[in-house]
């Protein structure tokens, strides 16, 4: 368009009138657009924009010309972000990406952009700002499912300390104490069984959650224990319920209610005994090493607190998998076993289901026990190739 | 001569205050801090802000360069602070989680650690609310900082390379006292309540110490329950830590014991009453007398005389009823719904308070004269 090439002040001014305020067909009218996570005010008049940027280029100025807000939020607060001025456009980049399922409103006050009258003459202009509302939808996805609840055993000690819930996809925090319930034999809800923590114990990708039973109710002699009694009692049956509607990363609620039924056994007041572990040495050079633990152990700790060393003390690479009820594990080496002695080393921090580790009881009676004793944490086995 | 003196004085002043900024004294270096989470907050010397990043297993010391000064003793109110943050962060109100609030004493500006979102991709944000209620972000993409790593604590892991850690850490409180930063928390792996003590300035070569603490119940069973909130305080002329536990004993430890021993037994001075969690504790002075204020999940703010805490004997007998309190006497004030509490100025304390009638979450000041 020829008129855009006129380089005199009056010519530029003429152009600005055309593009900003007239409805001619020569250029697109100023408009707002959402593009790649930024809100753009496009096809603005270059000269008007340049002049504004020269006189009023502060963050506050831009926030008043080009506010971007959530529709439900406070009226006087705009979304934090940065404004970038181009020749005929301004881009707003929010400090944090626009979220799904939220109604946003962007406005651009053309009148305010043209408020500087030092250099150019402006006629009466429309006070109608540009307006854009938008809402992002998450990509279609299926809701999360619960893949496991640990411990998997259906017989659990009265002083059970932890449960771990694993999900098929990343979840959101803030729902655990609403969704997780403990019911007694008559389906009455057990009151306050869990330790309430502001920071819930999720793993980094938020697919595994650890919940602790209130230690005050487990430990003997502590006030909650005396007043409220333990949440779990020997001989009784319970149902752990994970109610539907637990929101995942895509904003979808779980569709099903999951339950785990168990019966309580007597409290476990002894440390795991490595000496009682039963080792089944591998029968062939590629066969697994199998260890029976004689009792259920904490799933997460068991997953990482066992190493196998060769005769030189070097760690044997391989895959450890945990068996039924978390009371056995097997270890398959990456490279075949060689005829030699091996050592299984267990981190003394390994715990049973009641939080007792190799060296210390969770609930120590000071009048009896010696705290922090050291116990054996190694087991040896020898791999012997069978003849033939 | 006069001119020379003035010049000399100027040079000296510049040497002590201008040329040697906090950064060089505390070993801070410029760089980008990417917070994975922002939880407990504490102020250290010269306005250095400590931020607990439990997801990263680290504590950051940040030079936030808040040079504003406000010595007025006036009130403050920002109603619906959660809605204000919702607007500023551009997210749904239910996705704004305020993890902690602290007041920068010299400026009386408020600092909040906030999660924007509740999923694994939630952003950790440090927010400043100034006296004019202006909300801004404390940007950390180019900031003077240092970092203390909590994941490489000495322990049984030291000698053996165990499998991939799935440790989930929760840091419940952070307090700075004369060169020591105390970090309370627990993890899913080792439940034992550990009070970590870090020297500040942080020193990469110096291992942080981890003290196993417990308080005896009736002198018989030890408890490793996590400390919910703590307060550095001088009791009987000894620097001490007052520790509040869930459900709801209040115990004290001396700093000297925490520094000298690996396994420290605190004494339980009070039971604040079952079914509650202490959320924040501060020390205030009113009419020349010193008090501790305790915000509590299911109670009003409790007020205890420091003199009474000093006089308290360890509790040796259980209370006889579920919500009964015992030990150090206290006054239950008329302020309820207080989730975070800090000192503001000589006439007011600062609080994030849930209005129990409207449900609004407000950032407010509470007058000392009513406390």
Image (cartoon, coloured by chain):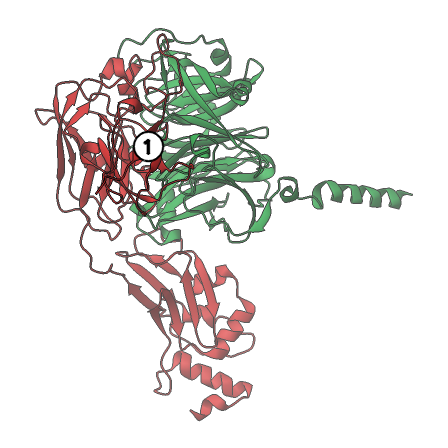
Chain colours: A red, B green
Above or below, A322 against A277 in this view is: below
**Picture coordinates of residue B20 (x, y %)?**
70, 43
Q: Mark 1 falls on what kind of element? A: loop
Quarter of the image with the N terminus of chain A in it: bottom left
**Picture coordinates of residue A129 (x, y %)?**
36, 69
Residue A8 or B199: which is nearer the viewer? B199
Above or below, A30 against B93 in this view is: below
Residue B324 or A143: which is nearer the viewer? A143
Task: Determine crowd level at label 1: few under 14, some 14-19, many 20+ residues with C-alpha closer than 10 A.
Answer: some
Tell me the residue at 41%/75% (across/down).
A125
**Picture coordinates of residue A94 (x, y %)?**
40, 59
Above or below, B164 against B217 in this view is: below
Q: Is residue A19 visible?
A: yes
Q: Is residue B287 visible?
A: no
Please identify the quarter of the rendering in which residue A207 is found. Answer: top left
Q: Which residue sits furthest bottom? A: A2
Residue A348 or A131: which is nearer the viewer? A348
Tell me the residue at 50%/44% (across/down).
B130
Please identify the quarter of the rendering in which residue A238 is found. Answer: top left
Q: Is residue A363 left or right of residue A55?
A: left
* Residue carrying label 1: A197
């Amino acid at each position: 368009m020829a008129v855009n090439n006129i380089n005199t002040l009056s010519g530029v001014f003429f152009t600005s009138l055309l593009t900003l305020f007239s409805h001619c067909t020569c250029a697109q009218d100023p408009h707002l657009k959402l593009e790649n996570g930024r809100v753009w005010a496009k096809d603005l008049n270059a000269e008007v924009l340049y002049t504004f940027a020269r006189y009023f280029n502060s963050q506050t100025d831009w926030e008043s010309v080009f506010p971007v807000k959530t529709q439900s939020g406070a009226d006087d607060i705009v979304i934090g972000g940065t404004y970038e001025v181009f020749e005929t456009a301004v881009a707003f980049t929010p400090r944090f990406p626009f979220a799904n399922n939220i109604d946003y409103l962007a406005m651009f006050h053309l009148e305010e952009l043209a408020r500087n009258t030092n250099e150019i003459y402006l006629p009466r202009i429309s006070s109608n700002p540009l307006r854009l509302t938008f809402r992002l939808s998450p990509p279609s996805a299926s809701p999360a499912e619960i893949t496991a609840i640990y411990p998997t055993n259906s017989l659990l000690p009265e002083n059970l300390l932890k449960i771990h819930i694993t999900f098929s996809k990343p979840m959101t925090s803030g729902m655990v104490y609403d969704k997780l319930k403990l019911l007694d034999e008559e389906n009455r809800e057990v009151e306050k069984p869990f330790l309430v923590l502001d920071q819930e114990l999720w793993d980094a990708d938020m697919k595994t959650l650890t919940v602790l039973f209130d230690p005050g109710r487990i430990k003997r002699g502590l006030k909650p224990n005396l007043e409220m009694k333990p949440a779990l009692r020997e001989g009784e049956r319970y149902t752990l319920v994970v109610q539907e509607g637990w929101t995942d990363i895509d904003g979808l609620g779980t569709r099903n209610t999951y339950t785990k039924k168990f019966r309580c056994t007597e409290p476990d007041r002894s440390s795991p005994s490595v000496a009682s572990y039963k080792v089944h040495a591998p029968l062939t050079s590629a066969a697994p090493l199998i260890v029976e633990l004689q009792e259920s152990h904490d799933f997460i700790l068991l997953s990482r607190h066992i190493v196998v060393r060769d005769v030189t003390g070097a760690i044997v690479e391989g895959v450890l998998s945990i068996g039924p009820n978390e009371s056995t594990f097997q270890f398959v080496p990456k490279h075949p076993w060689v005829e030699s002695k091996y050592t299984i080393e267990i981190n003394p921090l390994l715990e049973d289901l009641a939080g007792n580790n190799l060296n210390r009881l969770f609930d120590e009676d000071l009048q009896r026990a010696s705290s922090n004793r050291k116990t054996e944490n190694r087991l040896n086995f020898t791999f012997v190739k069978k003849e033939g | 001569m006069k001119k020379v003196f003035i010049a000399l004085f100027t040079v000296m002043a510049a040497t002590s205050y201008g040329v040697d900024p906090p950064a060089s004294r505390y070993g801070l270096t410029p760089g980008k801090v990417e917070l994975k989470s922002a939880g407990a907050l504490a102020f250290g010397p010269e306005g250095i802000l400590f931020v607990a990043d439990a997801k990263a297993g680290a504590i950051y010391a940040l030079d936030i360069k808040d040079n504003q000064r406000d010595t007025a003793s006036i009130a403050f109110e920002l109603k619906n602070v959660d809605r204000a943050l919702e607007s500023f962060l551009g997210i749904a109100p239910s996705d704004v989680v305020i993890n902690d609030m602290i007041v920068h004493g010299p400026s009386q500006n408020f600092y909040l650690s906030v999660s924007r979102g509740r999923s694994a991709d939630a952003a950790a944000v440090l927010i400043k609310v100034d006296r004019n209620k202006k909300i801004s972000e404390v940007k950390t993409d180019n900031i003077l900082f240092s970092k203390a790593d909590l994941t490489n604590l000495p322990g049984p892991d030291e000698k053996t390379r165990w499998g991939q850690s799935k440790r989930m850490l929760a840091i419940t409180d952070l307090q700075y006292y004369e060169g020591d930063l105390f970090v309370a928390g627990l993890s899913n792996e080792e439940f034992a309540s550990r009070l970590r003590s870090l020297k500040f300035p942080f020193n990469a070569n110096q291992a942080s110490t981890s003290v196993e603490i417990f308080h005896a119940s009736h002198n018989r069973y030890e408890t490793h329950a996590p400390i919910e909130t703590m307060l550095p305080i001088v009791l009987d002329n000894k620097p001490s830590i007052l520790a509040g536990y869930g459900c709801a004993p209040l115990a004290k430890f001396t700093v000297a014991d925490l520094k000298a021993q690996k396994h420290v037994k605190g004494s339980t001075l009070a039971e604040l009453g079952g079914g509650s969690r202490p959320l924040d504790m501060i020390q205030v002075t009113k009419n020349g007398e010193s008090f501790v204020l305790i915000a509590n999940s299911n109670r009003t703010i409790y007020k205890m005389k420091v003199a009474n805490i000093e006089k308290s004997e360890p509790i040796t007998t259980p209370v006889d009823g579920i919500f009964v309190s015992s030990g150090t006497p206290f006054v239950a004030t008329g302020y309820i719904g207080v989730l975070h509490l800090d000192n503001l100025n000589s006439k007011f304390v600062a609080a994030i308070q849930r209005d129990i009638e409207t449900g609004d979450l407000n950032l407010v000041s509470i007058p000392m004269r009513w406390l």
